Image (cartoon, rainbow, N blue to C red):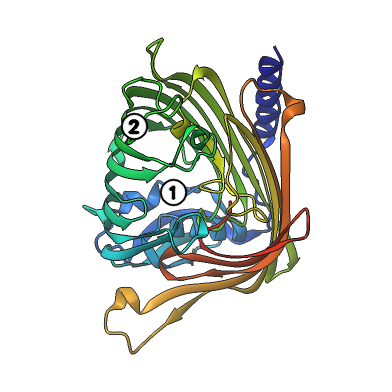
Amino acid sequence: MMRVFFLLLLVCAFQFLFSQAKLIIPDAKITPTYIRYISITGNEKTEEYVIRRELTFKQGDTVKIATLNYNKNRIYSLALFNKVEIFLQPIGDDSVDVRISVSERWYIYPFPVLQAIEGDFKKLNYGFSIMHSNFRGRNEKLITSFTFGYNPFISFYYYNPLINEHPELFLESQLTYSKIRNHSTLALASGNNFVEIHYAALMNVGRRFDVFRRLTFGGEFNQVQVSTYQPRRTISLSGKDSYVTLRMNYSYDSRDLIQYAGYGMLFRSSIAKAGFEKDGVNFSRISFDYRRYFPIAVDSNFTATLAARVFTTATRGKNVPSYEFLYFGYQEKIRGHNHKKIEGDNLIGAAMEFRLPLFSPRIYQLAFVPVKQFSVFRFGMYLALFGNVGAMQFQPMTLGNYIFVKGYGAGIHFLLPYDFLLRSEIAFNEARQSEIILELGTAF
């Protein structure tokens, strides 16, 4: 009963926050303000519709400076262009033509993979990935990855953002093989450490309702085998589990720059059912993730950001193998306990971050570089102050049984070319013990 009450309360809270969130960018209108025509230049390989479908304004609308800046960042969020500019050409007394100019990136490139598992350089993954980030000029993604070392894996990934125009449908698929050393302390209680071999095939089909809203339905086949069987390492007594997971996701995303948002919100919810056999893997899981980014104008050329996040995942079902546990210390982290492994079936968390630009993102031109896709790049640097808290527990879910861990700190965030974000931070936990964090990618 407590589970049902908690989930209903959570859904109501998120629904309230979501229903109140509208895309409102206050600013003075430009005079003249009516858009007569929108043109796009510089897209030599990229189809024009890829850019147009991200715009929140159209012909006949009035223009605001902040709206133009917002849309510029949305085009950057496509991760296809090194430089985006928007120009206004006055036409008559009350209208303008809008010209969007882009500078394309290099779209096919290999890059090395080097990962310290659990922050331990004795547990290295090393390998290679090859990515085509704009296949056929349609923003389709093709990625092949393979690694050796501590947890070797092979992955083939394909994403098509528009397989059908009316309605707008998209497709995602992935095949993976991985060999993972167990990281569940609970699973270790019955013996020495062991290895899990995972095979997975995923297929998602979704609909984009407008610029912000998406609904996805998907399925995934999983087969997991452990090197040494013990109870709960797999549900099957044979040491091998095979099961299907069905999932539905809904998202509303109005962030300006996905890679490092300064304005907007993200709301994501997911419902999943894993396994359908009574004596096999069989559980359900529901999750919510709400993020909000508030711009704080210091002056006309200087804007800071207050970012906030609340998230939770709840599990129901007794047949949950250890490889399906939730964790802090891997994808989800509590800075201050960055690599501390905390496992369970249910988690909740919250975070806040204040970002102050030291160098607002700027475009730099390197005239001596002969390849134009690498001669233009965007760079920025931010000071960040943050605090976060999280809690984990096993079933049954009881609010009073959550044990919370907390952390806070500061750091410098570097916005690098080709959408790389480097975070260099120092974090402290409740006991004021410190840790240094050097990671790629935003915390949220």
- Please report whichever mark, 2 or 1, sits nearer to the chain's N-terminal start: 1
Whether residue 94 is visible, yes or no, is no
Residue 171 location in percent, x, y? 31, 36
Whether residue 433 is visible, yes or no, is yes
Task: Specify the amino acid type for callout 1.
Answer: Glu
Mark 2 or 1, which is nearer the eye?
Answer: 2
Task: Specify the amino acid type for callout 2.
Answer: Asn
Relative to 315, say whether 351 is above or below.
below
Q: Which residue is mark 2?
A: 204
Q: Which residue is mark 1?
A: 54
Residue 143 location in percent, x, y? 27, 52
Relative to 125, say whether 61 is above or below.
above
Residue 418 location in percent, x, y? 40, 66
- Other residues around mark 1 within 10 Å, as few (<14) / some (14–19) / many (≥20): some
Q: Quadrant of the N terminus?
A: top right
Image point (38%, 14%), residue name: 276
- Other residues around mark 2 within 10 Å, as few (<14) / some (14–19) / many (≥20): some
Q: Secondary structure at mark 2?
A: strand
Query: Looking at the image, which residue sits at the far left?
Result: 136
Image point (23%, 53%), residue name: 135
Q: Secondary structure at mark 1?
A: loop
